[in-house]
Amino acid sequence: MALAPNPATKATMRPKRTPLGQRNRLTYDNLDPAFEYRVINDKDDRLKRAQEAGYEFVHEAGKLGDERVAEGTSIDSRVAKPVGNGMTGFLMRIPKELYAEDQASKIAEIEKTEAAMTPADKEGKGTGSYGEGLTKT
């Protein structure tokens, strides 16, 4: 009489599976904690603008996202991934200090805009006019 296979043993022998709908295409398994990472699509001049802002391409060995069937191999040393519609996303990184400066600048701009709002606008009851010097109709 044959014994039934032990389900616990069978589960440890199979490769790690990712359930349908839970695939993560934009993970990276070799992060340096001194940097903030971001996948930037190769569209218009986004890559050039990112470089001008202090981002650099990631060239390190590492896997970006989950593997997909029929996915092409990389054409150079930059870490990249097809992101859909014939577009490629490149993994780029920026030092945490520069990233923090950028975030502080964004917050300052938001606070400046909010300071120019009238109290009625902040409560959602205003005319939508911001700051002095704007005329109301």
Image: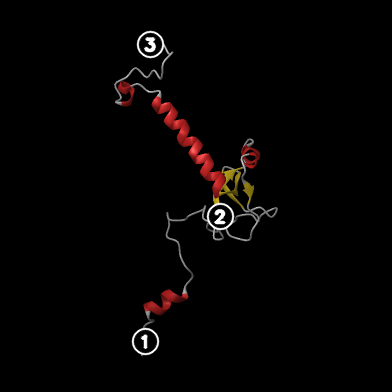
Can you tell which of label 1 and label 2 is closer to the viewer?
Answer: 2
Residue 8's quadrant in the figure? Answer: bottom left
Residue at 63% across, 41% down? 47
Mark 3 nearby-residue class (10 Å; few <14, some 14–19, many ≥20) = few
- Image x and y of residue 30, in percent: 56, 60
Viewed as shown, does residue 110 lie left or right of 94?
left
Cα distance in 3D space between marks 1 and 3: 84 Å
Q: Is mark 1 on a helix, strand or loop?
A: loop
* Of pointers 1 and 3, the one earlier in the residue sequence: 1
Proximity of marks 3 and 2: CB atoms separated by less than 8 Å: no
Mark 2 nearby-residue class (10 Å; few <14, some 14–19, many ≥20) = few
Can you tell which of label 3 and label 2 is closer to the viewer?
Answer: 2
Residue that numbered label 1 is attached to = 3
Residue that numbered label 2 is attached to = 34
Cα distance in 3D space between marks 3 and 2: 49 Å
Residue at 48% across, 54% down? 24
In the rendered view, tell whether residue 134 sits above or below residue 6: above
Amino acid type of the residue tagged 3 in the rendering: Lys
The residue sitting at the bottom extreme is 1
The foreground one among 8 and 51 is 51
Viewed as shown, does residue 119 lie left or right of 12?
left
Residue 20's quadrant in the figure? Answer: bottom left
